[in-house]
Image (cartoon, rainbow, N blue to C red):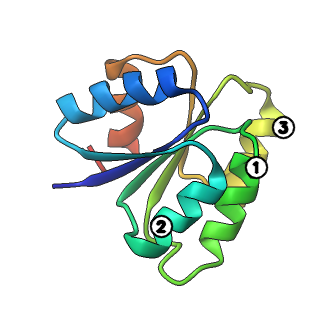
Amino acid sequence: MTSCLIVDDSRVIRKVSRHILEAMGFAVDEAGNGLEAIDFCQQAMPDLILLDWNMPVMSGIEFIKLLRSTDKGDRPKVVFCTTENDAAHIRAAIQAGANEYVMKPFDRETLQIKLQLIGIA
């Protein structure tokens, strides 16, 4: 089973995302911020990470830069899921190591298309 870590400070977003991903057949774990996510990844690197941009403790950009510099940190596919939609944010996310970008709010169909584009759905 493909594993996914949802990293978002919103419990509601994590719950909705979990529901979508579990219906798609993913095994899902959650983290409320980037620091929790790094700790999780050190224990068990997921196949996919859905990542929020704006979080307390460690932002999504800080997280992905740190993740990509760790052992096996190049392995997971990372999809930014955020309300930041301008070209500068999208470019920054891709340059930092994101594989794809999806706008909140998103539905199952939108997420599934993004995951297909990166070869994980």
Q: Residues within 10 Å of mark 2 (few under 14, many from 20)?
A: some
Name the element at disc 3: helix
Image coordinates of residue 39 in percent, x first then y, are 54, 66
Kindly identify which residue carries mark 1. Answer: 57
The residue under label 2 is which amino acid type?
Answer: Cys
Name the element at disc 2: helix
Q: Residues within 10 Å of mark 1 (few under 14, many from 20)?
A: some
The residue under label 3 is which amino acid type?
Answer: Ala
* Residue 108 placement: quadrant: top left
Q: Nearer the viewer, residue 77 or 43?
A: 43
Kindly identify which residue carries mark 3. Answer: 88
Q: Is residue 106 above or below residue 90?
A: above
State which mark lies toward you, 2 or 1: 1
Q: Is residue 23 above or below residue 42?
A: above
* Residue 97 placement: quadrant: bottom right
Q: Residue at x 39, y 16 (%)?
A: 107
State which mark lies toward you, 3 or 2: 2
The residue under label 1 is which amino acid type?
Answer: Val
Q: Nearer the viewer, residue 93 or 44?
A: 44
**Mark 3 vs 2: CB contact within 8 A:** no
Q: Is residue 113 visible?
A: yes
The quadrant of the picture occupied by the C terminus is top left
Q: Residue at x 36, y 40 (%)?
A: 115
